[in-house]
Image (cartoon, rainbow, N blue to C red):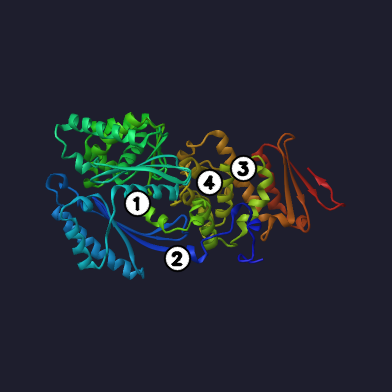
Amino acid sequence: MTDQTATAEDWGPFGRPLFEDPSARALSRIGVVDVGSNSVRLVVFDGAARSPAYFYNEKILCGLGQGLAATGRLNPEGKRRALSALRRFVLIAKSMGIPSLTAVATAAMREAEDGDAFRAEILRETGLRLWVIDGAEEARLSAQGVLLGWPEAEGIVCDIGGSSMELAVVGQGRIGKRVTSPLGPFRLQQIEGGAKGRKKHIEKVLNELKVELEADHRRLYLVGGSWRALAKIDMERRDYPLAVLHEYRMSQKHALATIDLISKSDLNELRGKTGTSPARMELVPLAAEVLKQLIRIFRPKEIDISSYGIREGLLYEQMPQRLRARDPLIEACRFAEATNARQPGFGRKLYDFLMPLYRSAPRARLRLIKAACLLHDTTWRAHPDYRAEVCFDNATRANLGGLDHRERVFLGLALLHRYKNSRSGTRFEPLYKLLDARELQEAEVLGKAMRFGAMIAMDDPTRVAELRYFPRKEILELRLKDDGEGLFGEVAQARFASLAAALQVSAKVTVARGHGHGRG
């Protein structure tokens, strides 16, 4: 049966893969230019359209909006640097064979009195047509970026730029009310009265926004470079073991402690510890003042960092709805299997073979099991001595959407155990503390189950054997069929015993044919 003739039922829980569909392949390499109040950036997306990889990513901190509130005009030096960057971006895109760039500009360009003239100059000098979007559209695109990597997002997206901050309500895959505000750091630099004056101004604006957005919201999703720099400082303060910003989560307590640290610390020292640029670090204390009042007024239970924003929102804009509806994690893992595994398609067969172990598993756990089965063989080219480490690194540090930090470590640990019995003595041990004892044991079981299932048969483990799991009786049974007896050699026996030991049950082997016998 070919992929084209398979039905939805044939594909089971995975669904038909979409990345080879012509409408999805059309999105396989998209170039986006974002001209913001602080930065000018080119991003080229490539790979599985639902969970894209960053084929190219370049940013220049031009500071176009610096001084705009006082002068009403774009920063002259920022204009020079932005035009130079855009010339380069157009040439880079041309060298990649990208036919056209989607280019947008936000608050500084829409508010400056010389914004239209500069846009005309950009078109004349580079051929790049820049679309200036309003605050509501900016909020919508940022929220779409969050939904690209976080389909289940429920709360308020807060996108802070240099000259403005946009807020949008998200939930059930949809975008609700959207508002814009003058709370970008460049604007706050012009507020009179020092810290007290800024505090009063921020409180007034946010109280008005809360009324406009109405309902209480449990989560804040923070988008923007200043928020990400603040999150790096929080990681440094907490000695957090995983340096991945996307889906990094802070409680109110942690965020407020970091805001207090920023207000009392030497910024150069913080910059050195976190690798933040001087231009970015200059804006972080002002962004921290905004976050402090966001926490006090909106009272979120959780504060999440999103590396996805307006640029990813522009990609999401071009996706058909059936592609948007797909799980970004599973689509990315399917793409990795199709391009890197020895036997593309085996992951689904391995998943089917392991399902008797997970009859009562919740949906969130089944999702990670699917991902693990798809990724289990994608690092086979690595040196055997380091294959387990490469697996763990790929899972925990790859650009994957729809995966929080605990899930990253769980997935990485399961893949590590796919190639290695013991997890002790590795450089990853500090990351294990993100999981509790039960999760550590479940990751080990999944890894050892994949380790056994991947070698009992090279074509399809369900053809030669069946797992039966009786947790109350504390028995794991392997029923051998067809030529299963011949394939159940010494290594397979050892791996099956290791799986039973990880489950803390007894191993039992039977032969499915009538003349078979049982072995304990």
Q: Residue flagged by tag 1: what amino acid is it?
A: Ile
Relative depth, front residue between 315 and 431: 315
Identify residue for label 4: 411
What residue would you read off at disc 3?
Answer: 445
Where is 321 relative to 396, above or below?
A: below
User: Contact, CB < 8 Å: mark 2 with mark 3?
Assistant: no
Q: Is residue 28 above or below residue 145?
A: below
Q: Residues within 10 Å of mark 1 (few under 14, many from 20)?
A: many
Quick check: can you spot residue 454? no
Query: Which dot marks residue 392?
Result: none
Q: Secondary structure at mark 1?
A: helix
How many C-alpha atoms fall within 10 Å of the one at disc 3: few (<14), some, or many (≥20)? many
Task: Report, in whole angstroms, how far the alpha carbon at label 1 lies from the one at label 3.
Answer: 40 Å
Distance CA(mark 4)–CA(mark 2): 30 Å
For label 4, the crowd category at 10 Å Cα-Cα, with few meaning under 14, some 14 to 19 and many 20 or more, is many
* First-in-chain label (1 vs 4): 1
- Discs 4/3, front: 4
Percent x, y of residue 49: 46, 59
Q: Which mark is residue 26?
A: 2
Give the number of the mark in front: 2 or 3.
2
Q: Are marks 1 and 4 in contact (CB under 8 Å)?
A: no
The CA distance from mark 2 to mark 3 is 40 Å
Which tag is nearer the camera, tag 4 or tag 2? Answer: 2
Measured in 3D between alpha carbons, the distance from the residue under mark 1 to the one under mark 4, in whole angstroms, is: 28 Å
Q: Foreground mark, 1 or 3?
A: 1
The three-letter code of the residue at mark 3 reads Val
Nearest to N terminus: mark 2 or mark 3 = 2
Mark yes or no: residue 194 visible: yes
- The disc at residue 310 is 1
Residue that appears at 58% across and 43% down: 363
